[in-house]
Image (cartoon, rainbow, N blue to C red):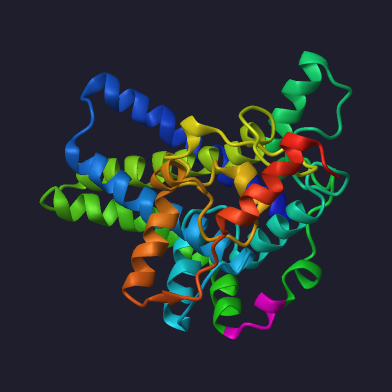
Amino acid sequence: MTRPARIYNLLAVFLPVVGILAAIVLLWDRGVGWTDLGILAFFYLFTGFGVTIGYHRLFTHRAFETSTPVRVLFAIAGSMAIEGSVITWVADHRKHHVFADEDGDPHSPHLGHDGGLKGAIHGLWHAQVGWLLDGDSHGRASAHRYAPDLIRDKPIRWVNKTFPVWVLLSLLLPALAGFVLSGLDPIGALTGFIWGGLVRIFLIHHVTWSVNSVCHYFGTRRFDIEDKSTNVIWLAIPSLGEAWHHNHHAFPTSASHGLKRWERLADPSALVISGMEKLHIVWNVRTVSEEKQAAKEKKVLTGVA
C-alpha cells in the first residue's frame, strides 16, 4: 500500500469517529433535531444505494443495464460514501469473490490467525477495518486485472479520477443543507456537517464492513457453496439488502440478494432496482429462478456432490 493510500484510509476510518464523539456531545447538550436526522437519512440512502446498487450490483456484477447518465450518477453516489474510488472498490470486491475465504481474499475474517477466541477477534477486526490499514496482508486487487472493463469505460474512469471532488461534496453538501434548512444559521451548517456528513459516513462504513466480517462469521446458510458467507437477518435493512450475503455468494449476478419473497421485502436495493425497471430506467435485470435455487439447495439436503 502506498503512503498516500495509507494516509487516506486512516483519515477515512478515523475522521468519522470524531463525528460520532461530537454527536455524543451534542446529544448530551441539546439533542438532535428532525432536520439533522432528515439530512442524515437522505445522504445515508443516497450514498448507500450508490454502493449497494451502483458499486456492487451494477459495476461489480453487472446485474442490470442502464444508461450512461444513470451509471455516472450511481458512480458519483457510491464515491460519496467515501469507501474508495469506484474502480478500486470494484476490483477489491471481484477479487473477494474469486478467493472468497481463501488465500488472496482481501478481507476474509478466517485468514491469518490460529483460531480460538483471540484468533476470531483478530479475524473479525481484519475483515471490518484492519484490511484497510495493514497494507497487503492478503493482497489488494489490481484494477488492471480485476476491473479492466471499467478502466476502458471513459465516463466511469472520469468519476474515478475525480474521486477527491466527490469526497469533498460528501462533506460539504450536508453542511450546506443544514445551513439552508435552518434559515441560514451557521450552527445548522455545523450540525448538518456532523450528522449528515461524519456520522453518516461512520454508519455507512461500518454497516458495509460488517458484511465483510459478520456476514462471513455469524448467521444462516442455505446453499451448497464452499465459502463461509452467511445471511444475517438483523443487518438486512441497515445494509440495504447486502446482508443476504450467502444468497449473493451463491448467485453473484442476481440483482436481488433477497431470494425468498419475504427476503426481497428486506432488500431495499432490490426494491429500488425493481422500481427503476418498471420505469424503464434499467433493463436486463438478472434474476434467479426457483428451480435454480432448489437445485443448489438439494445438494445440501441430500449430500449429492
Residue at the spot 69% in from the left edge and 50% down from the top edge:
295
- Residue 165 part of the magenta-drawn span: no
Q: Which portion, as a residue range, is magenta?
A: 149-154
From the viewer's perspective, is 147 left or right of 198? right
From the viewer's perspective, is 142 left or right of 68? right
From the viewer's perspective, is 83 left or right of 70? right
For the C terminus, which image quadrant? top right
**Residue 2 visible in the shown view:** no
Closer to us: 50 or 265: 265
In the rendering, at what x and y percent does residue 246 appear?
Answer: 64, 42
120 versus 15 height, above or below = above
From the viewer's perspective, is 41 left or right of 86? left
Residue at the spot 46% in from the left edge and 38% down from the top edge:
203
> Residue 24 falls in which quadrant of the image?
top left
Closer to us: 76 or 53: 53
> Residue 214 falls in which quadrant of the image?
top right
Query: What type of secondary structure mainly makes up the magenta span?
Result: helix
In the rendering, at what x and y percent does residue 13 appear?
Answer: 58, 41
In the rendering, at what x and y percent does residue 235 appear?
Answer: 49, 34
State the residue lying farthest toward the top.
Answer: 117
**Residue 123 visible in the shown view:** yes
Residue at the spot 40% in from the left edge and 50% down from the top edge:
268
